[in-house]
Image (tube, helix red, strand yellow):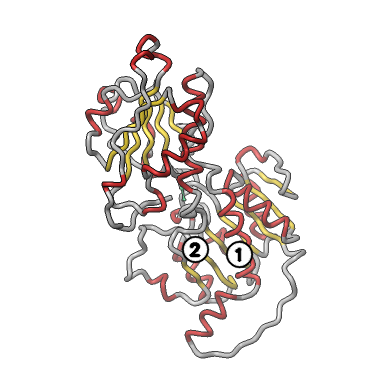
């Protein structure tokens, strides 16, 4: 979720308070939670916390609703004031300097995306404050998009798009995809959802994840040192890595050259994980059969980027894992579930490990 495209503002749609506070509850101040939700004016409507979406989520979480005071604002409007007594913050971004002093009661920050690279290094996080992210919210959409991506690569759609631009008739007949091999680099929530979709297509699934723990939809799981092995064995490589110092540049020239001749590459994670110059070279000289990139650096990808015109490469504008119907409702379900946990003194779901950066 990267809310970058400018959208029409609709401030009238934003409730500034959603308090169901009953003054009688003042007897038990620790049993209440003040939650500040920060919307981005420049963000897309799909990622906006509207009054309607919040009200619907409160209905679904009625048991917690009367213990949470919700304040919704645009960007930094009322931010400093609100941080003085807020217990929890839901946002995509925030000014981090001196947060511990500016937000003395803040116990929890929820980031409404899976990636938190824009906030790294996480050294600004006050020791008493827990950071959580949106991993898992994308599962259904990302699984569908992952299936689409490998089917497109298998059926030579990137090459046919290039042929179409050149008015070229070049039929190539391929068998059904079952039996091919896909390597998922980064089997977390998003990668895990992709592996389920790949299994359903009849693919052999190889996986890479820290620690190499098995996954029910992965036939062969490896730790990070198995990267070259899986790259060399796969017909399709599906990248779902977060951006951290360890993953930046991981799919470099050597890694790309280690892929099978004619293989396809997909990136649904973060752009800096891949060496794009090496990718372009491999697409132009035919080492790779095609690629689909959904994530870019920067976003929006500038009109002058050479990537737009590379043959056998399909670009999508960071849409593979987010949908405009359920993203914010599912985010609110996660937020309210964690509110209940915080109120009950239980550990929160989706904690980000500041030392790993995801
Ligand atoms: C996210 C994403 O970080 O969609 O949530 O990329």
Would you place residue 243 above or below residue 311 in this image? above
Viewer-proximal residue, 184 or 69?
69
Between label 1 and label 2, give the one nearer the viewer. 1
Q: Which residue is mark 1?
A: 148
Pinpoint residue 358: horizontal percent, then vertical percent.
49, 39
Residue 241 numbered mark, or none: none
* Dot 1: element: helix
The residue depicted at 63 percent of the width and 47 percent of the height is 192
The residue depicted at 71 percent of the width and 41 percent of the height is 214
Classify residue 301 as left or right of residue 334.
left
Measured Cα–Cα span from mark 1 to mark 2: 13 Å
Viewer-proximal residue, 356 or 344?
344
Outermost residue, top side? 27
Neighbourhood count class around disc 2 (C-alpha, 10 Å): few under 14, some 14–19, many 20 upward: many
Q: Which residue is mark 2?
A: 293
Q: Quadrant of residue 88?
A: top left
Q: Is mark 2 within 8 Å of ligand 1?
A: no
Pinpoint residue 140: horizontal percent, then vertical percent.
59, 51
The residue depicted at 55 percent of the width and 51 percent of the height is 240
> Does residue 125 appear anywhere in the picture?
no
Pinpoint residue 259: horizontal percent, then vertical percent.
62, 63
The residue depicted at 56 percent of the width and 78 percent of the height is 159
* Among numbered discs 1 and 2, the one appearing first in the sequence: 1
């Amino acid at each position: 979720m990267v809310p970058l495209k400018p959208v029409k503002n609709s401030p009238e749609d934003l409730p500034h308070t959603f308090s169901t506070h009953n003054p009688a509850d003042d007897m038990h101040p620790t049993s209440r939670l003040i939650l500040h939700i920060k919307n981005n004016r420049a963000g897309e409507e799909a990622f906006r916390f509207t009054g309607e979406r919040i009200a619907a989520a409160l209905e679904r979480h009625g048991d917690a609703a009367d213990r949470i005071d919700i304040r919704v604002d645009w960007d930094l409007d009322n931010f400093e004031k609100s941080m003085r007594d807020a217990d929890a913050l839901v946002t995509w971004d925030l000014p981090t300097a001196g947060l511990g002093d500016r937000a003395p009661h803040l116990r929890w920050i929820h980031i409404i995306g899976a990636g938190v690279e824009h906030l790294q290094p996480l050294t600004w996080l006050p020791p008493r404050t827990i950071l959580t992210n949106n991993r898992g919210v994308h599962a259904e959409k990302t699984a569908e998009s992952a299936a689409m991506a490998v089917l497109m690569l298998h059926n030579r759609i990137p090459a046919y798009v290039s042929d179409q631009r050149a008015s070229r008739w070049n039929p190539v007949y391929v068998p059904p995809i079952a039996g091919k091999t896909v390597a998922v680099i980064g089997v977390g929530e998003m990668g895990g959802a992709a592996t389920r979709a790949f299994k359903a297509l009849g693919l052999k699934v190889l996986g890479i994840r820290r620690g190499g723990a098995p996954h029910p939809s992965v036939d062969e799981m490896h730790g990070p040192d198995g990267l070259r092995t899986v790259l060399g064995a796969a017909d399709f490589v599906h990248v779902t890595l977060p951006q951290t110092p360890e993953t930046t540049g991981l799919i470099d020239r050597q890694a790309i050259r280690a892929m099978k001749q004619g293989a396809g590459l997909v990136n649904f994670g973060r752009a800096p994980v891949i060496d794009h110059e090496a990718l372009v070279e491999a697409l132009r000289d035919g080492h790779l059969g095609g690629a689909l990139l959904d994530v870019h650096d920067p976003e929006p990808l500038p009109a002058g980027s050479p990537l737009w015109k590379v043959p056998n490469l399909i670009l999508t504008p960071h849409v593979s894992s987010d949908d405009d119907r359920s993203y914010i409702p599912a985010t609110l379900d996660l937020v309210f579930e964690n509110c209940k946990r915080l109120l009950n003194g239980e550990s929160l779901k989706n904690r980000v490990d500041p030392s790993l950066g995801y």
